[in-house]
Amino acid sequence: MTYIVAVAQIAALPDDPLATAQKAAASMRQAAASGARLVVFPEALIGGYPKGASFGAPIGMRKPEGRAAFARYHAAAIDLDGPEVALLAEATAETGAFAVVGVIERDGATLYCTVLYFDGAKGLVGKHRKLMPTAGERLIWGFGDGSTMPVFQTDFGTIGAVICWENYMPALRMHMYHQGVTLYCAPTADDRDTWLATMQHIALEGRCFVLTACQHITRAAYGAEHESALGNDPDTVMMRGGSAIIGPLGRVLAGPDFSGETILYASIDPDEVMRAKFDFDVTGHYGRPDVFQLAVDTKPKTAVREV
């Protein structure tokens, strides 16, 4: 059987996580009405991706305005028992769809760039925290650990997610392939022309479908009160999308789209994965465990552990 999958290229509403969750729920319902069984949303959709912001932190200094900016960003993040998650769970229960949603997760004073997994009537079934924030992201986001790298079985494939430049971590990709991922989700903030080639490489390497979703944001939507190195021209495109869906042999099935907010769809045949693995199974008959081995520590790491 074939199934429809979708990527939702939509933008966050800065400082309003509840309204953004409502927007995501509406997109989920729209995609499900078009037959989508899986809907993938961008990185940091709920809570926002502060592109171009410096948080007032030149080397050796933390400016008061940067501390204020972080406090606002922390306030716009979400708790996993909050109303935003409840809204998304309600939408997946109503539609029966599986959803992969990028959020900024608040855990005490620390923020994490997180992907949440929703499975129909089951609601929130898991999460993945970004293992390695990139460059200046390390100023505002904590580091995930190996305890949140799950995959989920469905009747149309095995779903897992790797966030943005985590996709350049070969060991993490190898772990996902080892878990049998066939629907490899890549929420991202990378809107460069080179991103599509990365996604095609991963589809070929893992012999899996790849669904990548990026926000399309204009400066006007981002908000003039938000600092950005990209300037204050309301017509400036802060993030230009480029969402796409790729098949297991690297063929682009939908996108990349740079035109604006949209939902992209593709019809997939799960049997294509096995047909593609006939000549290449990176953790199976094309592996060389006598030469190379990967050890993965999946235990949670906390600063305080009671014994």
Image: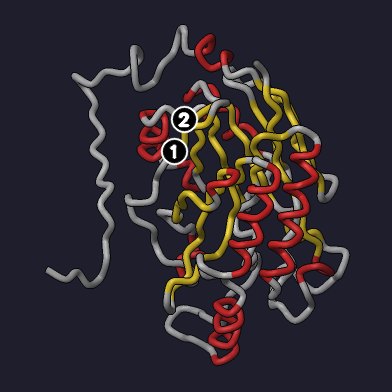
**Residue contact at pointers 1 and 2, CB within 8 angstroms:** yes
Q: Quadrant of the N terminus?
A: top right
Q: Secondary structure at mark 1?
A: loop
Q: Which residue is mark 1?
A: 151
Of 284 and 117, the residue lying toward us: 117
- What amino acid is found at the position of numbered circle 2 in the picture? Val
Q: Quadrant of the C terminus?
A: bottom left
Horizontal side of 205 relative to 263 (left or right) equals left
Q: Which residue does the image show at 34% across and 55% down from the upper left? A: 145
Q: Which residue is mark 2?
A: 181
- What amino acid is found at the position of numbered circle 1 in the picture? Val
Sort mark 1 into few (<14), some (14-19) or many (20+) by Cα contacts within 10 Å: many
Q: Reply above or below: 73 against 288.
A: below
Q: Secondary structure at mark 2?
A: loop
* Residue 164 appears anywhere in the view: no
Task: Measure the C-alpha gap from mark 1 to mark 2.
Answer: 7 Å
Of 260 and 178, the residue lying toward us: 178
Q: Reply above or below: 63 against 195.
A: below
